[in-house]
Image (cartoon, rainbow, N blue to C red):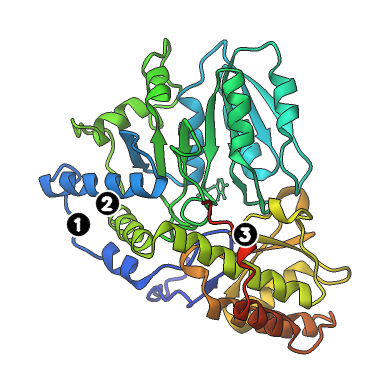
Amino acid sequence: MRDEPIGELLPPARLMLTPGPSCIDPRVYRAMMAPMVGHLDPWFMEMMTDVQILLRRVFQTDNRVTYPLSASGSGGIEAAVLNPLEAGDDAIVCVNGVFSERMAVIAERTPANIIRVEAPMGRTVDPEDVRRAAKGKKLKLIGLAHGETSTSVIQRLADYRKVADEFGALLVVDTVATLAGVPFGVDRDRVDICFSGSQKAISAPPGMSPMTVNAKAEEIIRARKTKVQSWYFDMQPAMNYWGKERLYHHTPPIPLIYALREALRCVLEEGLEARWERHAINQQALIAGVEAMGLELFVQNPADRLPTVTGVRIPEGVDDHNVRTQLLDEFNIEIAGGLGPVKGKIWRVGLMGYSSQRQNILLFLAAFEKVLLDQGFRVPSGAGVGAAVQSYRQPQREEVNVGK
Ligand SMILES: *Cc1c(COP(=O)(O)O)cnc(C)c1O
């Protein structure tokens, strides 16, 4: 064993233009450094109420059961599907990418019967296919990802809500990639169980999964005949810690809750509609830029494009890894490659929360041009930045859907 001292922790100053984690507002960093208190401290228990109020406002819900689960977004999936499902239940999971498939994989570990309804990569799941798969069944739930980050696709929740109503099923929705970045409201969109992730459009550090459950789903969970197979993700004790009782279940990550509180305050100070519009306008500029550079988007139908993540096809002869490495080494910019079947085929540029800022898009497009030229892809000089500038001068407001 070598015995040199390990140096001080000095992370590089990266610009994260990935599908999470996103960059963090300095206010949120400051909140994380606030003094530690105990998780049963009366001050902390009061502060938990603030976080729940803020979460309800961001989720746009009156649901009593609304709290940050101590886990990353995947833990949110786990809790959302394990709690309602029991042996003998039928459930449908709509699979159109890696994260919605993760929901299916997790659900398949329960004793319930899980039916996958699939769509090709880059497409939405056809609600007619869901209806056909459900035919003749009494469905417990339909699960899906609002934004499928791995393919940069968004789905229209109303279509699936309609099918869920026809079959008396709960609608379980992963909003990890959409909450606080895309028009959405839990009550308005009538989602029964909904979860998100702290590190995406909310722009808090990773490690928390905001969760909300309506009265109907809560009743189903409380009426279970069998115990939830996971002790940690069992919602009933979590409901007691985050409910009136504030009964100890596990020690939550206190500094992350401080950070989440401040990040939610930032979201609401900006205003949800203003934030949705900012995400849409910045993505419009990014799209104008990459298209002007001669690149193609992965998602063909503009209505299916997820506003927080843009999938760009990697052109023939260009090396995925070299481009991303050069962006990181030369410009401190991180973008993501493809996940699963689209690995090596697409790049994913995330414009989430605090990362979605004009100066970041213009810097990225300029850096991207330099890197692509160096990697042998011909780009008309200044085309990307020029098109983005024009897009900012004249945003296509009619295309900016703020959910009104
Ligand atoms: C990122 C993401 C997840 C997983 O979140 P982790 O925090 O990485 O566990 C799940 N679903 C969607 C849609 C995501 O974008």
Q: Residue at x 81, y 86 (%)?
A: 380
- Vertical order, 326 against 349 (above or below): below
Q: Can you tell which of label 3 and label 2 is closer to the viewer?
A: 3
Residue type at mark 1? Met
141 relative position to 248: left or right:
right
Q: Which mark is residue 309?
A: 3
Q: Residue furthest right?
A: 316
Q: Earlier in the sequence, mark 1 or mark 3?
A: 1
Mark 1 in CB contact with mark 3 (< 8 angstroms): no
> Where, by quadrant of the figure, is residue 94 drawn?
top right
Residue at 19% x, 57% y is 36
- In the figure, 393 relative to 314: above or below? below
Is residue 108 at all visible to an observer of this figure?
no
Q: Earlier in the sequence, mark 3 or mark 2?
A: 2
**Position of residue 79 measured from the top left corner of the image (x, y, whole percent):** 45, 32
Can residue 60 be seen in the rendering of this structure?
yes
Instruction: Name the amino acid, label 2.
Output: Ile
Q: Report, in whole angstroms, how far the alpha carbon at label 3 lies from the one at label 2.
A: 29 Å
Disc ID at residue 5: none
Residue 298 falls left or right of residue 49 = right
**To which quarter of the image does residue 102 belong?**
top right
Q: Secondary structure at mark 3?
A: strand
Q: Residues within 10 Å of mark 1 (few under 14, many from 20)?
A: few
Tally of marks: 3
The residue positioned 78% from the left and 85% from the top of the image is: 374
* Residue 254 tag number: 2
For the residues marked 1 and 3, what is the alpha-carbon distance in whole angstroms?
A: 35 Å
